Image: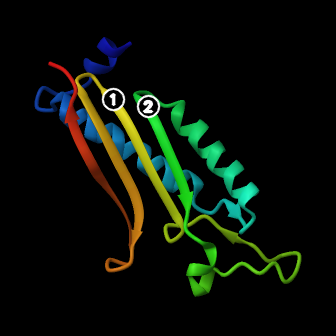
Amino acid sequence: MEKIADSYRIPEVSNRDQAIFETGIKLAAIFHQFSGTPICCDETIQTKIAEGIIASIKCQPFVKEVRIAFKALDDFEEEKFSKSHEYDYTVISGRNLIAEVELSYKEWSIVGHLEWIEQLNYPLMYMKSIKKISD
């Protein structure tokens, strides 16, 4: 299978480049697939939602570990959760989602991170570490 996939890669893309690309794909999948998912302050519900996200992303190629956390939903005035009536809930968004993906691709191990950066007013995806694990 890897040989088939590699046949579509242009020669200018190294194994390191591909590992970084794969990490970005996983982070983007977490952000774009799960933004808008209903959530509340109940820790049991948050744990179940996080477990579902983790299981989904771990199905993808090369993924070794996935960590999901939610910032306290009341950290953001516009996203306070009070459940003052039946229709009152909030959703997963770039402001309250923290994700980390660890993957191995050939000789490279990568950790990518997604978190809201207040100074940027943006949910930034970035590489936390890149290690060569073998030759």
For image coordinates 69% across by 72% down, the residue present is 90
Depth check: 9 or 46 in front? 46
Residue 76, numbered circle? none
Q: Circle 2 — which element?
A: strand
**Residue 24 to residue 77: above or below:** above
Q: CA distance from mark 2 to mark 1?
A: 7 Å
Q: Is residue 83 left or right of residue 4?
A: right
Tell me: residue 26, above or below residue 47: above
Task: Write the residue at 64% across / 44% down.
Answer: 51
Q: Write down the residue under mark 2.
A: 64
Q: Name the quarter where the N terminus is drawn.
A: top left
Location of the C terminus by quadrant is top left
Q: Position of residue 52 (x, y in %)?
A: 65, 43
Mark 1 crowd level (few <14, some 14–19, many ≥20, 10 Å Cα): many
Left or right of residue 97, residue 49 in this image: right
Marks 2 and 1 close (CB-CB < 8 Å): yes
Query: Residue 134, position in %: x, y?
Result: 19, 21
- In the image as oriented, which residue stretches furthest toward the right? 86
- Answer few, some or many: residues within 10 Å of disc 2's Cα (few below 14, many 20 plus, some between 14 and 19): some
Of residue 110 and residue 78, the one placed in the foreground of this image is: 110
Which corner quadrant of the image does residue 43 belong to? bottom right
Rendering quarter of residue 79: bottom right
Type of the residue with mark 2: Lys
Q: Is residue 91 left or right of residue 98?
A: right
Mark 1 lies on residue: 104
Q: Residue furthest left?
A: 12
> What amino acid is found at the position of numbered circle 1 in the picture?
Ser
Residue depicted at x 43% and y 51%: 28
Percent x, y of residue 62: 40, 28
Kind of element beneath mark 1: strand
Q: Position of residue 65 (x, y in %)?
A: 46, 36
Whichever of labels 2 and 1 marks the residue nearer the N terminus, that label is 2
